[in-house]
Image (spheres, helix red, strand yellow):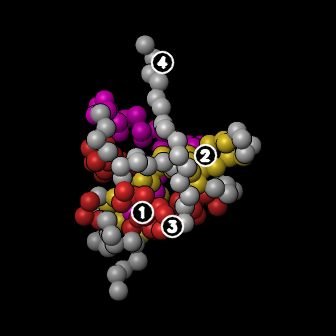
């Protein structure tokens, strides 16, 4: 029997490891590199008083932080209600298949309930068949959409 996975909120001292995991996640999704200084930009968003961004971390039995789920509350206009948006869920390659993903998802569901939110929404790339199978096994429903980004800073 495998030990029960540990899922806990991120703490300021976790920021260097969290940034490492974000870098792995970016590479895994074959996304463009992000500008330097992620820790400096992310820290205040996570740990300032009244922060509205939550990150849960998954630890292996030896205490290694091996994954994360990043969430924020959003408003669904058509439903006229808030939901928890899971922007990212990532597990380091060697940590997959040991129950950490399911534990993270249960932690996200618990966070939603704690915040009084009745639904969690997220997206995954359509090529990520492993993630799609995982979410389907949870009983989640896929919705066909295409995500866009528009750089308006220039």
Mark 3 nearby-residue class (10 Å; few <14, some 14–19, many ≥20)? few
What residue is pinned by disc 1?
133
What residue is pinned by disc 4?
152
User: Is 85 displayed left or right of 100 in the figure?
Assistant: right
What residue is pinned by disc 3?
138
Give the image location of residue 118, x and y in percent.
67, 57
Q: CA distance from mark 2 to mark 4?
A: 23 Å
Give the image location of residue 85, x and y in percent.
56, 48
Mark 1 nearby-residue class (10 Å; few <14, some 14–19, many ≥20)? few
- Please identify the quadrant where the C terminus is shown: top left
Q: Nearer the viewer, residue 88 or 145?
A: 145
Helix, strand or loop at label 2? It is: strand
What residue is pinned by disc 2?
73
Residue lying at the far front in this picture: please name it.
144
Q: Earlier in the sequence, mark 3 or mark 1?
A: 1
Q: Nearer the viewer, residue 18 or 148?
A: 148
Indicate which disc residue 13 carries.
none
Residue at 43% in and 64% down: 134
Residue 97 appears in which quarter of the rendering?
A: bottom left
Q: CA distance from mark 3 to mark 2?
A: 21 Å
Which stretch appears magenta? 33-58
Q: Nearer the viewer, mark 1 or mark 2?
A: 1
Can residue 10 be seen in the rendering of this structure?
no
Residue 65 appears in which quarter of the rendering?
A: bottom left
């Amino acid at each position: 029997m495998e030990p029960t996975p540990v899922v806990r909120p991120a703490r300021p001292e976790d920021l260097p490891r969290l940034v490492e995991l974000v870098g792995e996640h970016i590479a895994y999704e074959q996304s463009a590199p992000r500008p330097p200084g992620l820790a400096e930009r992310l820290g205040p968003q996570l740990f300032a008083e009244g922060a509205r961004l939550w990150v849960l971390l998954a630890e292996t039995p030896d205490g290694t932080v091996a994954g994360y789920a990043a969430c924020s509350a959003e408003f669904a206009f058509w439903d006229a209600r808030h939901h928890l948006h899971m922007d990212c869920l990532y597990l380091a390659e060697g940590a997959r298949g040991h129950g950490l993903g399911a534990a993270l998802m249960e932690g996200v569901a618990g966070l939603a309930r704690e915040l009084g939110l009745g639904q969690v929404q997220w997206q995954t790339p359509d090529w990520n068949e492993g993630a799609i199978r995982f979410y389907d096994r949870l009983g989640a429903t896929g919705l066909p959409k295409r995500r866009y980004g528009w750089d308006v800073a220039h």
